[in-house]
Amino acid sequence: MSVRSNTIDYDQLLQKIAGWSAELGFQQLGVTDIDLSAHEKHLNDWLAAGFHGEMEFMSKHGRKRSHPEALIPGTCRVISVRMDYMPPDSELSATVLDNPQLGFISRYALGRDYHKVMRKRLQNLCDKIQAHIGDFGYRAFVDSAPVLEKALAEKSGLGWIGKHTNLINQSAGSWFFLGEIYTDLPLPVTRPMSVQAAENHCGTCTACINICPTKAIIAPYRLDARRCISYLTIELHGSIPMELRNSMGNRIYGCDDCQLCCPWNRFSRTTMEDDFFTRHPLDAPDLLQLFNWSEQEFLKYTEGSAIRRIGYIRWLRNIAVALGNAPKTEETIRVLEHKKQAFSANSMLVEHIDWALKQS
């Protein structure tokens, strides 16, 4: 990494970085050292149990995920930021989930792809630092590399990892994105504003464990991703396990149930970022309308969205499962049969459509 003057006042620099961060739309910033030994064993145990499923990227980088300095040599600090994403203009989640003719899309995916939005802001933050002190070593990440983002955010004081394995902030809930800057700047390590804020406040609450539709949270702080609807609808490339399909209901991209029931989200705030407002709109879409989209329409209506990453076939797969869980109508059967004929060469999709047709 870089060579710098040793006259930098790092306490003052951190204050400036925090101010620039707020100007760029981040709700909070923290700094931590790179010792993740307390989280490394949990990660290794989780991987050894096979809970990551097809997410081979979780294991293929070896120690780099839990050793930031192995990923980016010279790293001695990690700057963590969070940004609220709940759109203020979306239909209530409960309204969508209670209507089997609608498709539920995780609220984080209703707007523009967060990777693009946050990566640009983090780069702007790095540019401001560089303009102030000169060249320095850094690399910014937004869910794009082997980074233990929740562990780093927890250590930096942004919250605690809850029983559902998401980060929870005492005054802001959990509806936010995380991003990181690995740097060689020896900035002061931040701490929560109070001892209470640093503690895990899940207590005896098991709401997220109890509500999980597929029982993916097999114990407090232990998630079997292979059962998680977010994994099944986004990360899984092949066939969705038969025994989990009915439990998926009308969730066609991700699942928010564990956050929707979390008592701490009564303190959450809606986003002020236009980029995260509902697009097209997809907050309460009709399942049959979505299933009737051509591939060109899918690409058009998901342009700039994180949804695009799963591709058209997996999009249809997910909707077929939701239609199988919806009340059967003549139109539903007709549309399913038509899609089956159109994609007869795709055995994976046909298998899900056949399953949907057989549901009563």
Image (cartoon, grey):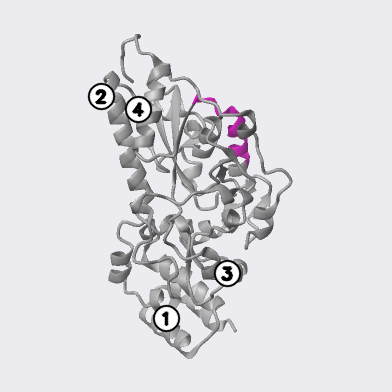
Residue bearing the label numbered 3:
245
Residue type at numbered disc 3: Arg
Residue that extends furthest to the bottom in the rendered view of this protein = 330
Classed neighbour count for the residue bearing mark 2: other residues with Cα under 10 Å, few (<14), some (14–19), many (≥20): few
Query: Distance between the Cα atoms at labels 1 and 4?
Result: 50 Å
Work out whether 53 lies above or below 152: below
Q: Nearer the viewer, residue 205 or 287?
A: 205
Q: Earlier in the sequence, mark 3 or mark 4?
A: 4
Which residue corresponds to the image point at 54% horizontal and 75% vertical from the top-left?
A: 100
Residue pointed to by mark 1: 340
Magenta span includes 33: yes
In this rendered view, identify the residue nearer to me: 285 or 95. Answer: 95
> Is 204 on the left or on the right of 59, as rendered?
right
Name the residue located 37 percent from the left edge and 57 percent from the top edge: 277
The magenta segment: 32-45
Q: Closer to the N terminus: mark 3 or mark 1?
A: 3
Mark 4–mark 2 Cα distance, whole angstroms, equals 14 Å
Q: What is the x, y in percent for residue 183?
A: 39, 25
User: Can residue 348 be seen by looking at this rendering?
Assistant: no
- The nearer-to-camera label among 1 and 4 is 4
* Residue 338 location (% of width, % of height): 39, 84
Mark 1 / mark 2, whichever is N-terminal:
2
Q: Secondary structure at mark 2?
A: helix
Q: Circles 3 and 4: CB distance less than 8 Å?
A: no
- Residue at left 35%, top 62%? 279
User: What amino acid type is highlighted by mark number 4?
Assistant: Tyr
Q: Which residue is mark 4?
A: 138
Spatial CA span between label 1 and label 2: 58 Å
Residue type marked 1: Lys
CA distance separating discs 3 and 1: 18 Å
Residue 196, position as x, y percentages in the image: 64, 32
